[in-house]
Image: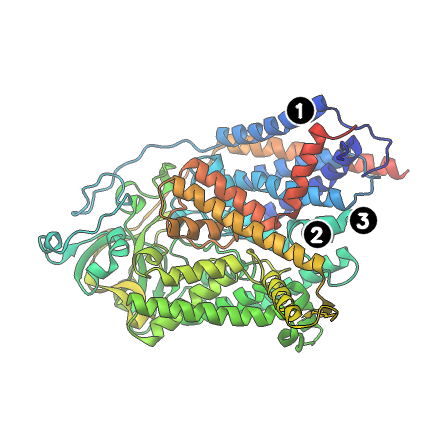
Amino acid sequence: MSPRRYRPITTVQAIVGTVAILAAVAVIVGMSQLLLLPQTGVRLLEAPEHEDEGLTNRGEVTCPSRENLARRPSPMPVSSSELIECPKLFDGEQVRYEGEAVGVVLLRPTHSWVHVNDDPYAVRIGPVSEHRTVAGGNSGMAVSMPRETAAAVTPGAFRTAGTGLSIVGTFLRADPDDGGAPSIRATGVRVVRDARSVHQEISVRRIVAAVVFVAVAMGLLVVRRVVRRRSYT
Amino acid sequence: MLFRPDTGDLAAIGLNLSRVLLVVAAVMLIPAVLGFALGETNDALSFVIAAALTASVGLVGEIILPRDIDIDWQHGMMVAAVAWLVAPVFGAVPLHLSGHYGGFLDAYFDAMSGFVTAGLAVINDLDHLSDSVNLWRHLMHFLGGQGLMLMALSLFAGGGGSVGMYVGEGREDRIVPNVQRTAQIIWRVALVYALIGVTLVFIVLIGAGVAPARAIFHAINLWIAAFDTGGFAPNAAGIWLYHSWSVEIALGIFMVAGALSFALHYQLWQRRVGEMWRNIETRLFALSILGVFAVACVGLLRAGTYDSVNPLMRRAFFQVVSAHTGTGFSNIPGRLFVTDWGLLAPAAVVLAMGLGAMAGSTAGGIKLIRLGLVAKAISEQMRRLTLPRSAVTIQTYHSGTRQVLSDQVVRSALTILLLYLVLYLFGAAVGLFYGYTFDQAMFESTSAAAAVGLSIGIVGPTMPVWLKITYILQMWIGRLEFVAVLALVGFIWSAYRGRV
């Protein structure tokens, strides 16, 4: 403990200190809330043919029975959630899968890999960076396709809604050519939506806040320097 | 008898906390620059705001608090405990402003996960996140993995309490007697690894087919997450995105490197390679990885997950190494642990996560040195039973140097080991309360408390609020390995109830 020229804190001081810390955190949270970009409203994209669950396909997934599966049209429409929740059921089946290319396109000599998401951002509402409406995490499936097809794909990113793809192929629960990871080996790939740029307005409120905060920090830096110089002299 | 702290104690803690915040603010400028360069103006501005805010708070502390107080060990512990709670508050600001979070608590969850190098995430639509915010997620891994205290100690003279700050964030190994010099050595080792690691990962990413411009960004982030045993990845698909065994091997090398103690790195740096084989922890680490891998293989074979050797070896080995090193990278979708891996293989992964790697590394969990010490104590006890009462026995172990196993060391190791088990079970109990099965709740709880980051799908944006708070507390307590947290609880208690 430090030398006794300092007074022990009183219970009132302890309480006041605790409240002050909580208030400071509340101020930071409130400030952060104030500086959030406004939500712009969601413009719904055209849903994939098999999508009938509203905005999200990521709720509880119940694996369909073999009989129900047999009633689906061939190739059977599937979602990534179904493939991951019921991998053995769909293993080796011809499937039709639709979504947005994201991440990186891996161009390999014989075939290429594209990761295709079918979460709400991919198939219904577009990227969060566009509208700031959140609807859960991402969900997708790896798709192996010919190099020339993959070369025309633009993956989704911060300022891009990626190419929308409709894929027909075989789902493999543990693809031997990929060291056992799940994937769809595409036999047919169709572009259903071109990639597009996502525009974000620059926030004037943030510019003003940045100028004010930087000015305060610079001012404090000067004060600190003066205080230090005085304490040395 | 507890004595009430005085204003001088608060000033000493506050001053060092301010210095930690100044370091965090300085690092925030890196993604700000990247954001402006890439035209991600709104996110770049959010980093400027967050950096200025964090720096302002730090500077106020530097201005108003006296600098002539010598901090002691207890102050150091307080600084460590509080800094790991406060830094994520400021780190969460640019995350929250990105608009990818359901609220500030979610951003705080990811910031805590970033700083403690867990890698669990509740972000929405990661695949459309800006590069600057994505880089910040990984820089938090770097700051936390190398050590917030360590960062501050490298730049500011800490005084006598440096040891408390250093030990408070879960480090035990002092490479050289001076803590500040130790901090600088750790930084030097890390920077050399960074140079080699980013280059290697960049090359394998190019080989995997990633375009060069993206490869460099992914290489930096992936190397940070691997070496600091973090687990965040630039995309939601994680390591599955790359479909490349060479990427997995390269990352595996740095995951293991990150899981070795910095004291051992220093020994290797000094060309004392023999220490690798003599050290009780490295031996146990190798044995444990092989043992858990064997169990995982048996589990996968029994579940019929893979029908040939290559997939079995590749998926099982990567997941076991990722879990054991506390990294949390995954080369399969996490839900497959539940839907396709049976029960035994995920249980092996839980075991690996719970055990952790070496003390003094960036990995979390119980740590193998503690397990080794307890095992040695048990064998010593058994040996004593076979000897006459008057016999005197001495048990030794090798960790840097040959050391005698004392009762105090064993008691300390056993206490922390038991506290970890309680922490794992506590999180699992909360998971059970929310209706998850025990195996799933245990998986996620262990992953949070051991700062691993593998997930079977419970952790996500729609997770119940109290479960988020539980995992945040688990990550914080687990990262600090209890000591600093217990010291903080004692400090707060004495502030209210201590004797004046």
Residue B26 in percent (x, y) is at 64, 46
Q: Residue at x 23, y 38 (%)?
A: A54
Which residue is farthest bottom?
B274
**Mark identifier at residue B166:** 2
Q: Could you tell me the amino acid type at mark 2?
A: Tyr
**Amino acid type at image mark 1:** Ile
Give the structural element (helix, strand or loop) at label 1.
Answer: helix
**Frontmost residue, B317 versus B435:** B435
Please state if B317 lies on the left or on the right of B285 as rendered.
Answer: left
Decide which of B337, B156 is in the foreground and name it.
Answer: B337
Instruction: Provide the chain ID for the residue under circle 1.
Output: A
**Mark 3 chain:** B
Counting from the top left corner in percent of width and height, residue B113 is at 51, 47
Q: CA distance from mark 1 to mark 2?
A: 29 Å
- In x, y percent, where is residue B394? 72, 70
Which residue appears farthest toward the right when viewing the image? Answer: A233
In this image, B177 relative to B305: left or right?
A: right
- Residue at image mark 3: B160
Is the Cβ of the residue at disc 2 closer than 8 Å to that at disc 3? no
Same chain shared by disc 1 and disc 2: no
